[in-house]
Image (tube, helix red, strand yellow):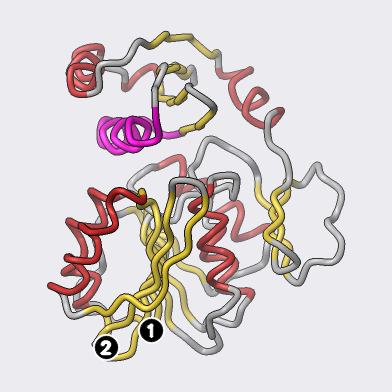
Amino acid sequence: MNYLQFEFQTKNIAENEILLALLADAGFEGFEEEKSVFKAFIKESLFSQGIVDEIVKLVPVPYSKTLIESKNWNAIWESSFEPVRVKDFAAIRATFHAPIKNVVHEIIITPKMSFGTGHHATTWMMMDQMSKMDFIGKSVFDFGTGTAVLAILAAKLGAQSIIGIDNDEWSIENAKENIASNQTHQINIEMGSAVPPHTKFDIILANINLHVLLNNMASMSAACDSGSLLLLSGILITDLASIENSLQENGLTLESTLQRKEWLCLSARKN
């Protein structure tokens, strides 16, 4: 299966964030952020020039498009993947990397074009904050699971049951591979884009983007009993006020804020 790689020449993180939300809704599956370049990937069979034209009207940045044949695209992705270390708490590596020493938890993934390999500041912060939380015996919901690294880490921290959802078929396939590699079979991965109704969770992990967080804050709150925790990221510093207002409106209290580069990770609790 051939993929198309788009390289958008962006000026700031805010443009990357908007592009990520719009392109994900349009069927793009993998994303990379580099200095002044935002890369996005889509199956050639799903590509619509009209949709990209509409997106570029909203975010007017120059871009280039490259065809990546099926035999080459994943090799290109893998070649740029380096192990990730979150202090002495956890590390993420591929099967072709040597084991990482002196960390409490090691996560092994098959690097494919799914969000959440740990390289992005938001995933790093989520993992760092998880080191301070009690997961033993808890029920967990991983909203927008991507590679499932957060769900896998929750399992390694003692969570009893975990549901992870994503609206990207490629991410679902990759997440299941990674769950098997880490023998974390208490994780159930499902295709979806909404919080499961009539289900309560002790902890919700949501590393997505501002648009999705705001649109789903009410349903996330409804899935929490009093005292349940939400760990949220994919939030720019400039979006803090919007998130704080949404938390308050939905019966959630902000407990802590972590910043890394231009990004925030927030911990909130159900009243």
Question: On the picture, is 207 further left or further right than 212?
Answer: right
Asked if residue 24 is positioned above or below residue 216 in the image, the reply reads above
Q: Whole-percent x and y of residue 167?
A: 33, 47
Question: Under tag 1, what secondary structure?
Answer: strand
Main SS of residues in magenta: helix
* Amino acid at circle 1: Asp
User: The C terminus appears in which quarter of the rendering?
Assistant: bottom left
Q: Is residue 106 left or right of residue 36?
A: right
Q: Is residue 219 above or below residue 161?
A: above
In which quadrant of the rendered view does residue 130 lie? bottom right
Q: Earlier in the sequence, mark 1 or mark 2?
A: 1
How many tags in the picture?
2
The circle drawn on residue 19 is: none
Check contact, mark 1 vs mark 2: CB within 8 A.
Answer: yes
Task: Say which residue appears at 59% left-offset and 21% top-offset.
Answer: 73
Q: Position of residue 211 (x, y in %)?
A: 23, 48
The three-letter code of the residue at mark 2 reads Asp
Q: Alpha-carbon neighbours of circle 1 within 10 Å: few (<14), some, or many (≥20)?
A: many
Residue receiving disc 1? 202
Q: Residue at x 62, y 28 (%)?
A: 77
Distance in Å between CA atoms under marks 1 and 2: 7 Å
**Residue 254 in magenta stretch:** no
Q: Is residue 19 magenta?
A: yes
Which residue is depicted at the point 33% across and 90% down? 227
Report which residue position mark 2 lands on. Answer: 225
Residue 200, by quadrant, is bottom left
Residues drawn in magenta = 12-30
- In the rendered image of this protein, does residue 29 appear above or below residue 211? above
